[in-house]
């Protein structure tokens, strides 16, 4: 049991490093999202009406890693095209060409409150938990094995 625990603890360290890294990256996305919301609410960035020119989906990846991606091609008032990925299929299906959305320009992209819904606060905890779980189980197994070994040695 102790060797299994050591293997899980050591092998899980790479996954834990990934989980911790993902936690901080997703946390920063959440901070950026909240800052954009605050700027929008303060009125510093004017809204622009974006018109959906077309929408499409495509499959990325192969086999079991395959995912369907949903995108909108938007036209801003100046006639510039902008492609926006939509994470939620239901939101993508509800939108139709010629629908209009309010968007706010930040550097090279638009923040569209109706489809940019956040979700960063719970997502970071999921990645941290998944990343640290194998190492935590490994450490628990090591502690149990050590307690058993100590109990056997004292009797």
Image (spheres, grey):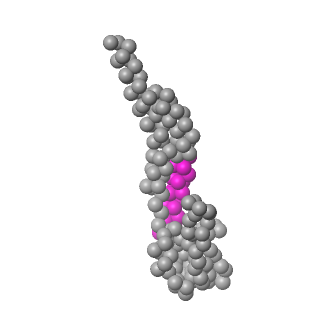
Q: Quadrant of residue 103?
A: bottom right
> How far from the left and from the top, in percent, is residue 141?
42, 31
> How far from the left and from the top, in percent, is residue 154?
35, 12
What residue appears at the point 43 percent right and 55 percent down from the top-left corner? Answer: 122
Q: Quadrant of the C terminus?
A: top left
Compare residues 29 and 13 and report the one nearer the observer: 13
Q: How many marks?
A: 0
Q: Quadrant of residue 50?
A: bottom right
Q: Is residue 85 magenta?
A: no
Q: Is residue 130 visible?
A: yes
Q: Is residue 40 magenta?
A: yes
Outermost residue toward the bottom in this view? 98
Q: Quadrant of the N terminus?
A: top left
Q: Is residue 30 above or below residue 83?
A: above
Q: Is residue 111 visible?
A: no
> How far from the left and from the top, in percent, is residue 126?
45, 51
Main SS of the magenta part reads helix
What residue appears at the point 50 percent right and 57 percent down from the top-left corner? Answer: 30
Q: Is residue 144 above or below residue 79?
A: above
Q: Is residue 118 above or below residue 14?
A: below
> How far from the left and from the top, in percent, is residue 116?
50, 68
Compare residues 101 and 34 and report the one nearer the observer: 101
What residue appears at the point 62 percent right and 62 percent down from the top-left corner? Answer: 62
Compare residues 118 and 85 and report the one nearer the observer: 85
Which segment is the magenta one? 20-42
Is 81 on the left or on the right of 151, as rendered? right
Is 3 on the left or on the right of 58, as rendered? left
What residue appears at the point 47 percent right and 31 percent down from the top-left corner? Answer: 5
Q: Quadrant of residue 49?
A: bottom right
Outermost residue toward the left in this view? 155
Is 80 on the left or on the right of 19, as rendered? right
């Amino acid at each position: 049991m102790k060797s299994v625990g050591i293997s899980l603890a050591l092998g899980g360290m790479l996954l834990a490093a990934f989980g911790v890294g993902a936690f901080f990256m997703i946390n920063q996305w959440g901070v950026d999202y909240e800052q954009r919301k605050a700027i929008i609410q303060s009125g510093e960035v004017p809204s622009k009406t974006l018109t959906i020119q077309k929408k499409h989906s495509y499959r990325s990846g192969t086999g079991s890693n395959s995912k369907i991606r949903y995108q909108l091609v938007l036209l801003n008032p100046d006639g510039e095209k902008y492609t926006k990925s939509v994470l939620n299929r239901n939101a993508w299906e509800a939108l139709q060409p010629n629908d209009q959305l309010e968007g706010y320009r930040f550097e090279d992209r638009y923040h569209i409150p109706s489809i940019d819904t956040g979700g960063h606060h719970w997502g970071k905890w999921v990645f941290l938990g998944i990343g640290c779980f194998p190492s935590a189980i490994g450490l628990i197994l090591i502690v149990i094995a050590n307690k058993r070994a100590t109990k056997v040695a004292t009797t």
